[in-house]
Image (tube, rainbow, N blue to C red):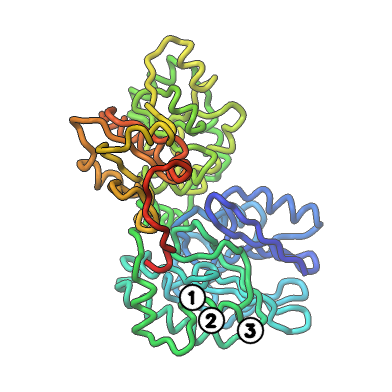
Amino acid sequence: MKIQQIYTGCLAQGAYYIESDGEVAIIDPLREIQPYIDKAAKNNSNIKYVFETHFHADFVSGHVTLAEKSGATIIYGPLANPSFKATIAKDNQTFKLGSITIKVLHTPGHTMESTCYLLIDETGKNHALFTGDTLFLGDVGRPDLAQKAAHMTQEDLAATLFDSLRNKIMPLQDDLIIYPGHGAGSACGKNLSNESSGILGEQKKTNYALREGMTKEEFVKEVIDGLLPPPQYFPLNVKMNKQGYKDIAEVLKSGTHSMNSEAFEKTANNMGALVLDVRSKEEFATGHIPNSIFIGIDGGFAPWLGTLIGDTMHPILLIIPKGREIETITRMARVGFDNTLGYLEGSFTAWKQAGKEYDTVNSITAKELEMKIENVPLFDVRKNSEFLSERIPTATNAPLTAINKHFNSFPKDKHFFIHCAGGYRSMIAASILKSRGVHNFTDIRNGFTAIKETSILTTDYRCPSTL
């Protein structure tokens, strides 16, 4: 028996490759499915099953294409209603994979079709539980993502999740390995651990949602408390996962169309395309195409793209570092952005060499801010929990996730400063402000991390978990 977790940091997502006696099961695969096929072929094995824990909201799974290419059967738990061919398993139904068995445990609550998969080894012992978004390390799945589809309130779903955890998971033995669908950084939970696997007994001791003696009312209140609004793209990804999607090969073919500066500019104007610049924050600050939006590839690229752009079908043109075209388009497709029209050949350098107009972002170091800090408007675009934890006392919180909501808070008649934790998010904010005609600001390079190295007054640190 072989179990391999294939973890994708940008999405904080875990897919799983399970092999026994020449037969393979994949749980919650990513959209680019060739690595799974290649791995099975290398091991002279055949992919027999693709298990889906639920209809994912935060990424487009590779289940449909993988089944088509490998001949595998797609398995969902009870209550799933996909538009494509799949086996809808019954609760406690088992599937043989070589010498091992995979048992279906229907655990509704995160969504009503949410299902965990219990791996029973060759000796008949429960070995591991693949929990999807039902149980994370340190948290449980948020119960507010499926309420429209399920015609239930988030309180109803949370109460259902309580029953699933207490009746299906917590009675299992303490030494069971837990393989969750996500880790820290995912928007599918609020208190996820940095660890990517754990032990059930440890979770029973440390996970607030599995607390001994916890009432259902307490669980519902604590699970719902502090949930941020889900990103805009989540419902669109659910739809793609339920109804199917284009082969990623088609998306790559259209997206990797290179254009010279003239063709790029003409396409942007004629198609109303968004120009997305994925270079480094330093390069963007030094020079960029006017009205382009920055979301750097070397950061939380895909989730920020989905959170801030929202419409996955909006036409997009790309400014990409040379050699990273396929990587960029693949990572966009993981969250459903399939309408990439192409990229600028030669990147921003070609635009500049063509003599075309470009813009810059004013920026200064934290040390330079130290000399100007008194009586200047300062906006902190970190999350509210980060802001409450530690901040410059005179700063105003305008979280990047809700920048449009806070747009009117930014002064239009005097200069102001913006910062985040390390400079990535504030540069995204800078690009959005500039695209909406606001230019009277300066970005603080390297953000709050650099600010703390100066004599600028900041509040005493409070752990976010105590807020």
449 sits to left or right of 417: right
- Mark 1 residue element: loop
Q: Residues within 10 Å of mark 3 (few under 14, many from 20)?
A: few
The secondary structure type at the circle numbered 2 is loop
Whether pointer 1 and pointer 2 mark residues with C-beta atoms closer than 8 Å, the reply is yes
Q: Tell me the residue at 74%/60% (across/down).
A: 46
Q: Residue at 18% x, 30% y: name it.
A: 413
Above or below 68: residue 53: below
- Amino acid type shown at disc 2: Asp
Q: Position of residue 220 (x, y in %)?
A: 36, 78
Furthest toward the bottom, the residue is: 213
Residue 293 to residue 307: above or below: above
Seen at 54% across and 30% down, the residue is 256
Residue underneath mark 3: 174
Camera-nearest residue between 19 and 212: 212
Instruction: Specify the amino acid type for callout 3.
Output: Asp
In the drawing, does residue 189 fall left or right of residue 229?
right
Alpha carbon distance from label 1 to label 2? 7 Å
Instruction: From the viewer's perspective, tell me whether residue 56 is left or right of residue 144.
Output: right
* Location of residue 81 (image quadrant): bottom left
Q: Which mark is residue 17?
A: none
User: Can residue 424 be seen at all in this image of the molecule?
Assistant: no
The kind of residue tagged 1 is Pro
Residue beneath disc 2 = 91
Q: Nearer the viewer, mark 1 or mark 3?
A: 3
In this figure, which residue is indicated by the disc labeled 1? 78
